Every structure is written in C-alpha cells, then in structure tokens.
Image (spheres, grey):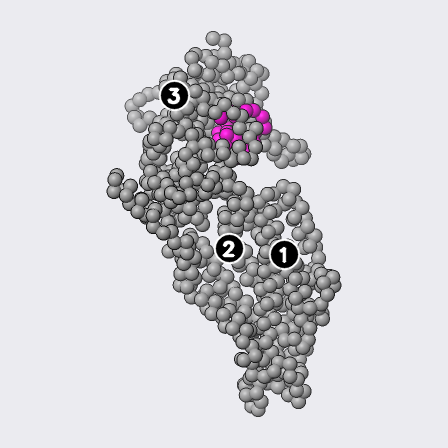
C-alpha cells in the first residue's frame, strides 16, 4: 500500500455569522470534525449536497482559509504550523483547480501571462519559462497561437483547461479539484475528466476531487467520501461504496443517479425536506431529520465514524453494533 | 507530435514583444473617434498653454479702462484688437484665456493627480485588507466628508497660506476621500473574485496581487471619476481664488475670470462670462471623451 500523501485530522471550520434578530452571535459549522487520508497517486472523491462543506475543506487544505481546529498533514508535516516562507514553498506542491472557469482567470491578462505567473512568483525556469508555458498549454490542448489571447476569447471548457495548466505550472504533487466540471456541458465534462486522469498518470498527481455529481466521482475516484452537513457519513473504496453502500444518505444519493435504461426497475430512495441549516445542526445524528430508517437512538446520540469492514467507514447507528 | 514540439520551441524563442500590449491599447484608442477628438483637443489646449506668449494677441495684464467690457468680433469697432471682447478692466479676454490655460490645466491635473494618488493608495489598502485597516481609513474619510468641501479647502489653505500651488494641494486633499471611496468600492468586488483567490493559491505576495491584479481591474471607475473631477477642481480653484486664497489677481485663471465677471452679466457683457465657461466646458468634454476611450482601450474584453 502506498503511503499517505495527505492526512486530515479532526478538521473543523466555524464561520462567525451575524446574529439572529436578537443580535446573538452564531456560528456556521461548515466543517465539523473531518478525518481522511489520501494515498500517493490516488484520487479521493469528496461528494455531498451543496453547503455540506466540501469546498471549505478544499480551501482549508490550501490554507486559503484558516481552520478553527484540527491538523492537515502533508508529507508528514502539519501545514497549519507553517510560517509565511514555508507556506509559499508548500504552494509549489499543493495546487487548486477552481469550479467556475469564467471567474478564475484575470480578464486583463493573456493566457500566457496567467500560466507563467506561478513560475514568476516562485522564480522558476527564468530562461525557458515561455517554452514551459507553451508546453503546458499544449498538454491541455491550447495551441501556441492561442496563448496571446485573453480569457474572454475562450469557451468554458478551454478556460478550465487553462486553469488546469496554471495549476500544473509549479509541478505540484497534490491538486485540489474543486468541482472542476460542474460548470461545464456534459460533453465537455468527459474531456476535462479524461484530461485530468491522463495528467495524473503523466505527472503522478494525487487529487482531492470535490463534486456533487456521483457519476463524475465514480469516473475519477479510487476512494470516495460522502459528506453531510460538515461531517463524513461514509468513506470507502469506490467499488465498495457504489456496490454496497451502508449509510441511508449514501443510498439515497446513489439512487438519484439516472440510469440510461428505462426498463431497469430499482428502488428509489427519495429524501424529503432540505438540508438543515449548518447554524442549527440537528441533535444526535445530523441526518435524523431526513433519514428513512430512523432509530430511537438517532435523535439523541451522534454516531461516530467506524470501520465496519475493511476500509469501509460508516457513521450510522444502523451499522454501529456489528 | 514531433512537429508540434518543434513549433513550440520555435515560437517560444521568438522575441516577446513587450510593447504589443501597449500597441493594442493605442490601436484601440486610435480607432475610437470620440477619444481621438478628446485627445486632439487636449493636445491643442496644452500647446496653447505652452506657447501662450506667441499666440495671445495682447498682453493679458494690460488694463485699458476706456475699452472696458467691449464686445468682440461679432460687433463693429474694436473687433480685431480684442477678438473675444474685453473684461471689466479692459483686458482682452482671448489673451487671458490663452494665458489662463496654463494655470487652469495645471490646477486641474495636479489637484486630481494628488487626489488620485492618495485616494488610490488609501482605497486599495482599505478595500484589500478590510477589517481594522478598512475601519480606520474609512472612518477618517467619513470625518473629512462631514465638512463641506470648500470649507475644508479653506481651512487647509489657512494652514498652508494663499497661492495657486497651495490651492492645488488643498483641492487634492479635499478630493481624496471621494476618490478613496470609489476605489475601495471597486476593490471590494475584485477582492472577492476567484482569480484573486487563485493568485493567493499560487503564492503571490499581497503587493503583487494588489499592483498587478487588483489595480488594473479597478482602473475603469478611477479613470472616469478622475476626468470628471478635473472640471470640479478647476472650478473649486476659482472659488478659492474668489476668496483671495487661490490664484492671486491679476493672474488670469479661468475660474477666477468667471468669478470676476459674474456681476457684469446683468449689464449685458455676456462674453466676459461665457468664454471662460466655454473654455472649462471644452476641457472637461475633451477629458471625458479621452477618459472614456482610455477606459475602453484598456479593457481587453472590448477589443476586437
């Protein structure tokens, strides 16, 4: 088994929110105690409804946000204790691809400039910088002629490719892909996903792949984590999770994936209601307000994430006693 | 594959023309007719200001009371000597306008230059860093807002002493809060964008982000606001002159000419007020046209 490149321990991020009508200060518990590890060269898919804290985790790993509590260990070192200089050198190894390709590129800079900038900031390859930039762009399917253009002259898929080239410019080991395809057409999504997987092989990349679309997760991941309201509810290798999900929430998510064959009959689990507000997290199990197989204990006691079978972690009272 | 690699190598060896960005901007400006009209007008004004002694038909300081408040070429008589008529002291208005371009343009540009540099600096700091810095700067700005602008200018002049140069500084300071506000507002929207976050993710320093990415993206409102401010600066300099704090008479300055001749408007000497007013208007119009064109030319999204 390969070693862990990144480990996250008991990660929490609480955002202060302006109080209710009485002016009481409240906190939004965006990420509320999350543990996981990613092995070198693998992809961890992180899925969950919007607002469950997926993106926050991605930003915490890049230290674009400072966590309230917890540890983020990259190559054996807790990056939360890094000072400014160490943090800057960490940036060479950890990069991010953003969700919205229309917002993630500076509209006043040429594509060539944008991709060259990480190297300028870290003073890398001063002589061959231009050549390196054009090679990177070529890798992601942007021709040298297009390099002098501005972001508005490209389509969404092309811009996302440019975003990927920028993330690769520093030769990182680890990339957080924050819903990299959710803003794109389905036909383009496949291209970008395949590109990312090719690049993973070529550069030995490790991905944290954040998405709300489970079929995308299924396509790219080795391990899959399902989050609900700031906590992990299930974590397992892809095959196990997709074939024998244990948590009712995972089952509901999986049953919502459309199958392009109307003759197949299957059990549909339809969740009722909305995700509760992360300001007022339900007592006991966070999911109990919407859970179809509710036990009496769920309302009072919060289930812990435990290993039910090998590599298969679930936080649910239904599977607690085995 | 091989040919592609070769091509990349070839292209990467080509000399990168660092002027091409500037070239494109110029090209864009060149093809914008109204901006070119603005630019031409401003160039003419500047030339007139520089070569005033060679262009002006008479001495702008030469009083001749027999000729006071005489009309210009549109009426019979004195037309050729004073093309635009004379003021209440019998000085040629055209000559005074030509000499006045020197002071008025200087006041406008320098005062707004001071306001823009201070305002951009404060606005960038307040908007980008937010929090305590933002609070400190913006509350200070609010305090300055609480004073009527001319009163604030007068009190600054009271400290600095009278004179046109001091008036420029005073007006610059008075205009700073508004400029800081405009800049801060735009910085707030840019600061929240994903491309700024991406800059942080690659490890850019705050200084680099502010100068290379925030500033270019907030230039549009700064340019528009600055060009508009130049007009008010010229007029405010006149107001200070009127109070004896700005340009000291008999120095010809457009605003001062306007203020001095105001009382003779009712007695029919419309030219003494109209021409300085027109001069200010043309300057402002030219600056606005150029400013608009410049804003568009600097935005790659609008280039074809």
Residue A238: assigned label? 3
Q: Which residue is mark 1?
A: B176
Q: Is residue B241 left or right of residue B101?
A: right
Where disc 2 sits, the SS reads helix
Q: Which residues are the magenta region?
A: A52-74
Q: How far apart in space, not on screen, are marks 1 and 3 (Cα)?
A: 59 Å
The answer to whether residue A282 is above or below residue B208 is above
Where disc 3 sits, the SS reads helix
In the picture, which quadrant includes the C terminus of chain B?
A: bottom left
Q: How far apart in space, not on screen, are marks 2 and 1 (Cα)?
A: 17 Å
Q: Looking at the image, which residue is at 67% across and 32% down?
A: A24
Residue A321: assigned label? none
Residue B220: assigned label? 2
Mark 2 or mark 1: which comes first in sequence?
Answer: 1
Q: Residues within 10 Å of mark 2 (few under 14, many from 20)?
A: some
Q: Position of residue A199 (x, y in %)?
A: 35, 32
Q: Looking at the image, which residue is at 37% across and 19% down?
A: A239
Q: Position of residue A209 (x, y in %)?
A: 42, 29
Q: Position of residue B96 (x, y in %)?
A: 60, 78
Callout 3: residue from which chain?
Answer: A
Where disc 1 sits, the SS reads helix
On the same chain, marks 1 and 3? The answer is: no
Look at the image and say whether residue B71 sits in the magenta stretch.
no
């Amino acid at each position: 088994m390969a070693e862990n490149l990144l480990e996250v321990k008991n990660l929490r991020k609480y955002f202060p929110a302006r109080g209710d009508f009485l002016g009481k200060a409240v906190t939004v518990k965006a990420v509320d105690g999350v543990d996981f590890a990613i092995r070198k060269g693998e992809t961890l898919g992180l899925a969950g409804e919007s607002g469950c804290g997926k993106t926050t985790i991605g930003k915490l790993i890049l230290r674009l946000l400072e966590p309230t509590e917890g540890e983020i260990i990259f190559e054996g070192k807790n990056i939360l204790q890094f000072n400014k200089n160490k943090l800057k050198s960490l940036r060479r190894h950890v990069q991010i691809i953003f969700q919205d390709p229309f917002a993630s590129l500076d509209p006043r800079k040429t594509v060539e400039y944008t991709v060259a900038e990480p190297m300028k900031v870290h003073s890398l390859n001063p002589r061959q910088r231009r050549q390196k930039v054009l090679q990177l762009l070529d890798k992601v399917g942007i021709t040298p002629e297009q390099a002098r253009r501005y972001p508005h002259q490209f389509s969404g898929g092309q811009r996302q490719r440019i975003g990927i080239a920028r993330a690769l410019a520093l030769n990182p080991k680890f990339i957080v892909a924050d819903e990299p395809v959710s803003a794109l057409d389905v036909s383009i999504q496949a291209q970008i996903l395949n590109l990312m997987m090719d690049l993973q092989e070529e550069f030995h990349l490790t991905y944290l792949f954040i998405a709300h679309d489970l079929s995308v997760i299924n396509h790219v991941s080795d391990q899959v984590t399902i989050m609900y309201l700031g906590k992990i509810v299930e974590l397992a290798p892809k095959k196990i999770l997709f074939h024998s999900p244990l948590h009712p929430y995972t089952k509901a998510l999986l049953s919502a994936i459309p199958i392009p064959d109307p003759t197949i009959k299957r059990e549909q689990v339809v969740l009722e209601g909305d995700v509760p507000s992360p300001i007022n997290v339900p007592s006991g199990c966070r999911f109990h307000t919407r859970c179809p197989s509710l036990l009496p204990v769920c309302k009072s006691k919060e289930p812990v994430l435990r290993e039910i079978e090998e590599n298969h972690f679930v936080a649910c009272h239904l599977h607690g006693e085995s | 594959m091989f040919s592609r690699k070769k091509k990349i190598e070839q292209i990467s060896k080509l000399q990168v023309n660092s002027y091409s960005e500037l070239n494109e901007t110029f090209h864009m400006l060149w093809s914008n007719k109204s901006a070119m009209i603005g630019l031409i007008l401003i160039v003419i004004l500047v030339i007139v200001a520089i070569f005033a002694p060679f262009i002006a038909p008479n001495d702008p300081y030469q009083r001749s009371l027999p000729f006071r408040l005489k009309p210009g070429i549109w009426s019979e008589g004195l037309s050729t000597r004073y093309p635009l008529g004379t003021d209440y002291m019998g000085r040629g208005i055209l000559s005074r306008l030509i000499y006045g371009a020197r002071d008025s343009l200087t006041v406008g540009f320098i005062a707004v230059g001071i306001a823009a540099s201070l305002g951009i600096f404060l606005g960038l700091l307040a908007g980008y860093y937010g929090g305590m810095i933002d609070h400190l700067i913006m509350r200070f700005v609010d305090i300055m807002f609480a004073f009527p602008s001319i009163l604030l200018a007068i009190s600054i002049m009271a400290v600095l002493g009278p004179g046109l140069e001091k008036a420029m500084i005073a007006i610059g300071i008075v205009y700073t809060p508004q400029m800081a506000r405009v800049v801060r507002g735009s910085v707030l929207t840019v600061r929240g964008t994903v491309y700024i976050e991406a800059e942080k993710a690659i490890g850019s320093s705050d200084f680099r982000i502010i100068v290379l990415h925030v500033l270019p993206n907030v230039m549009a409102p700064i340019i528009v606001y600055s060009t508009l401010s130049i007009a008010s600066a010229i007029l405010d300099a006149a107001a200070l002159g009127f109070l004896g704090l700005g340009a000291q008479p008999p120095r010809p300055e457009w605003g001062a000419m306007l203020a001095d001749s105001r009382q003779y408007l009712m007695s029919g000497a419309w030219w003494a007020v109209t021409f300085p007013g027109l001069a200010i208007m043309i300057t402002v119009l030219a600056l606005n046209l150029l400013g608009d064109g410049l804003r568009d030319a600097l935005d790659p999204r609008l280039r074809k």
